[in-house]
Amino acid sequence: MKKEAATAGFYDPPRLLPPVPRTQILTIKKLLAGRKLDYPRIDVPTFKKAPRKRKAKKAE
């Protein structure tokens, strides 16, 4: 099973991040031990932030 997973190759993410395996096999034992999936952690904003609106000042 590990051999077949290794033949899937690597994903080469943009922005000069290191390549990660396309297929990863994690057992329950490894997950409970704290191991996590190896994936590119890209912090790309999906939406533009809306401009903040201010309340109009009351005329005195």
Image (tube, rainbow, N blue to C red):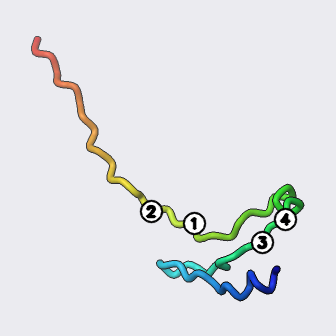
Q: Residues within 10 Å of mark 3 (few under 14, many from 20)?
A: few
**Disc 3 from disc 4: Cα separation:** 7 Å
The local secondary structure at tag 2 comes to: loop
**Disc 2 from disc 1: Cα separation:** 9 Å
Q: Nearer the viewer, mark 2 or mark 3?
A: 3
Report the residue marked by disc 1.
41
Q: Earlier in the sequence, mark 3 or mark 1?
A: 3
**Disc 2 from disc 4: Cα separation:** 30 Å
For the residues bearing labels 2 and 3, Cβ distance under 8 angstroms: no
Residue at (36% x, 53% y) in the render = 47
Nearer to the camera, 14 or 4: 4
For the residues bearing labels 3 and 4, Cβ distance under 8 angstroms: yes
**Disc 3 from disc 1: Cα separation:** 19 Å
Q: Which residue of the protein is positioned furthest toward the top in this rendering?
A: 60
Report the residue marked by disc 4.
27
x and y percentages locating residue 41 in the rendered image: 57, 66
